[in-house]
């Protein structure tokens, strides 16, 4: 069997003040890359510092997880923002996280838009272009995580940024390779065994079953498990165990 490698990432550092979100401590030992909230949808200075320190100690690569400025809605509400607004907001967030990376001797690896910003950028070329422009202005060596067949992936590639195609272990897919809206039934995949089976098939066959029951061709370099999914730790554990049986190596994109 030829060696296969895949990155396993999770959105971490999303706690804010007294509000604790996600199973960060347990997930760090299961993933290879962390998307760290930058303060706009979650995360505060002490949480950013603690998360980067933990990532360094665990050997997990760090990326920025910028969002709309929406603490109340956890960044999952689309907002009226111009491309200039988005450019400035993303640039600001990259600098915020990178300050803690530099102070802790960590090299920031990537950028992955969060929540509604990610979903809008998947279809809106203007929003995707603004995010790509901000990344290029800050550091053109940063990897851009984006969904396959998305406007965000195309914008990053057109801008000359290195890309990482991302799939989701805990989300259902539409036929057009977009994620099923969280408000719809069946949008979340919470059963660990089902998630592990879907992700193993994705890596081996490059196919995944859609919400309508059809097969979708989908190639991914990284798989996300959302830290605030109730069964996140069980899903990540099941995926790792299934990958081990299939000879699939979990490693960050930069380690290939």
Image (cartoon, rainbow, N blue to C red):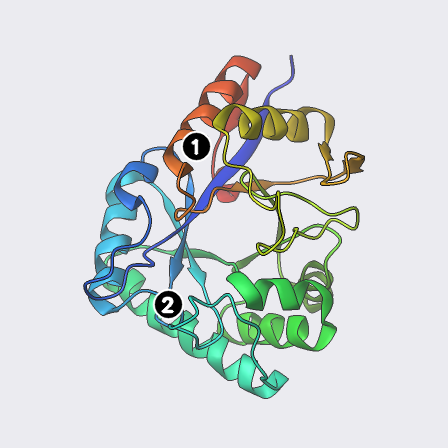
Answer with left or right where residue 7 lies relative to residue 96.
right
Q: Residue at x 62, y 42 (%)?
A: 186
Check residue 37 in the rendering and tell me which mark sits there, or answer none: none
Look at the numbered disc 2 and give the secondary structure of its residue: loop
Q: Quadrant of residue 80?
A: bottom right
The quadrant where residue 207 appears: top right
Where residue 81 sits: x, y (%)? Answer: 58, 84
Q: Give 184 or 142, whichever is nearer the viewer.
A: 184
Q: Where, by quadrant of the figure, is residue 96 drawn? A: bottom left
Question: Residue visible at 43% across and 61% down?
Answer: 64
At x 43% / y 46%, what residue is drawn?
10
* Secondary structure category for the residue under label 1: helix
Residue 217, position in %: x, y? 78, 37
Residue beneath disc 1: 236
Q: Position of residue 76 (x, y in %)?
A: 50, 65
Q: Earlier in the sequence, mark 1 or mark 2?
A: 2
Q: Is residue 21 above or below residue 216?
A: below
Q: Can you give x and y, in whole percent of width and height, for residue 160 in the image?
A: 67, 64
Residue 206, compared with residue 221, is above or below; it is: above
Q: Residue at x 72, y 71 (%)?
A: 124
Q: Which residue is mark 2?
A: 38
99 or 19, which lies in front? 19
- The answer to which of 184 and 30 lies nearer the viewer is 184
The Cα atoms of the two marked residues, 1 and 2, are separated by 23 Å
Judge from the rendering whether residue 168 lies leftward or rightward of residue 231; answer left or right. right
In this rendering, position of residue 242 left or right of residue 72: right
Query: How many numbered discs sit on the rendered protein?
Result: 2
Residue 47 visible, this orientation: yes
The N terminus: image quadrant: top right
Query: Does residue 151 appear left or right of residue 165 in this picture?
Result: right
Verify CB contact (< 8 Å) between mark 1 and mark 2. Answer: no
């Amino acid at each position: 069997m030829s060696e296969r490698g895949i990155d396993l990432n999770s959105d971490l550092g999303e706690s804010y003040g007294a509000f604790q979100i996600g199973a960060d401590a347990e997930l760090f030992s299961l993933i290879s890359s962390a998307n760290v909230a930058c303060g706009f949808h979650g995360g505060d200075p002490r949480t950013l510092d603690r998360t980067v320190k933990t990532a360094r100690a665990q050997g997990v690569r760090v990326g920025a997880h910028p969002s709309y400025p929406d603490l109340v809605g956890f960044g999952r509400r689309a907002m009226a923002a111009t491309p200039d607004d988005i450019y400035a907001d993303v640039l600001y967030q990259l600098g915020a996280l990178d300050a803690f990376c530099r102070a802790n001797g960590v090299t920031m690896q990537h950028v992955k838009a969060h929540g509604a910003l990610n979903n809008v950028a998947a279809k809106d070329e203007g929003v995707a272009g603004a995010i790509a422009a901000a990344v290029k202005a800050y550091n053109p060596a940063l990897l851009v995580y984006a969904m396959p067949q998305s406007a965000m992936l195309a914008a990053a590639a057109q801008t000359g940024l290195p890309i990482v195609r991302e799939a989701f272990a805990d989300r259902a897919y539409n036929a057009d390779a977009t994620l099923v809206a969280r408000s719809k039934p069946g949008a979340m995949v919470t059963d660990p065994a089902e998630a592990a089976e879907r992700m193993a098939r994705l890596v081996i066959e490059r196919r995944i079953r859609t919400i309508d029951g059809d097969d979708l061709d989908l190639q991914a370099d990284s798989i996300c498990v959302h830290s605030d999914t109730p069964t996140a730790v069980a899903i990540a554990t099941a995926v790792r165990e299934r990958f081990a049986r299939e000879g699939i190596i979990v490693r960050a994109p930069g380690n290939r």
